[in-house]
Image: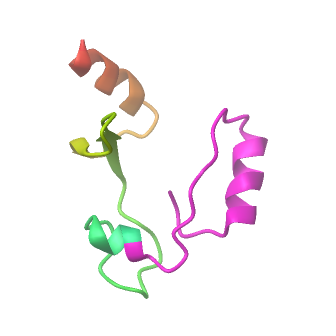
Amino acid sequence: MSFDSPEKNRAFAEKHDFPFPLLSDTDRALAKAYGAAAGPETKFAARYTFLVGPEGTIEMAIDTQDPGGQAAAILGELG
């Protein structure tokens, strides 16, 4: 999720061949609720990864230090 518009996120996802849509949080409401933005003037969201379980609850929250290696680290942890 980013603060970019849905159009910008769609173009970015298409450019990088993502098999999923990127979500937009243009008013920063979700980022503020999850602690990834201090307020409405925050330019960029802090990088966090949230694993959401089948019931819609957050199972794990990770301060993302290595975006490129995050998926492998999570899969390794989940075993």
Q: Is residue 34 above or below residue 12?
A: below
User: What residue is drawn where x is 75% and y is 64%?
Assistant: 7
User: What residue is drawn where x is 24% and y is 19%?
Assistant: 78
**Quadrant housing residue 9:** bottom right
User: What residue is drawn where x is 38% and y is 21%?
Assistant: 72
Q: In this rendered view, identify the residue nearer to me: 6 or 67.
A: 6
Pinpoint residue 54: horizontal percent, then vertical percent.
34, 34
> Hey, which residue is sitting farthest top in the picture?
79
Pinpoint residue 61: horizontal percent, then vertical percent.
23, 46
Left or right, 5 with respect to 74, comes to right
> Hey, which residue is sitting farthest front in the picture?
55
Q: Is residue 46 above or below residue 67?
A: below
- Coloured how? rainbow
> Magenta stretch: dominant SS?
loop
Pinpoint residue 43: horizontal percent, then vertical percent.
47, 78
User: What residue is drawn where x is 34% and y is 45%?
Assistant: 49
Q: Is residue 18 above or below residue 29?
A: above
Which residue range is magenta in the image? 1-29
Pinpoint residue 14: horizontal percent, then vertical percent.
77, 43
Left or right, 76 with respect to 68, comes to left
Q: Quadrant of the C terminus?
A: top left
Q: Is residue 24 above or below residue 51?
A: below
**Quadrant housing residue 26:** bottom right
Left or right, 65 with respect to 68, comes to left
Label tally: 0
The reply to whether the magenta stretch includes residue 77 is no
The reply to whether the magenta stretch includes residue 28 is yes
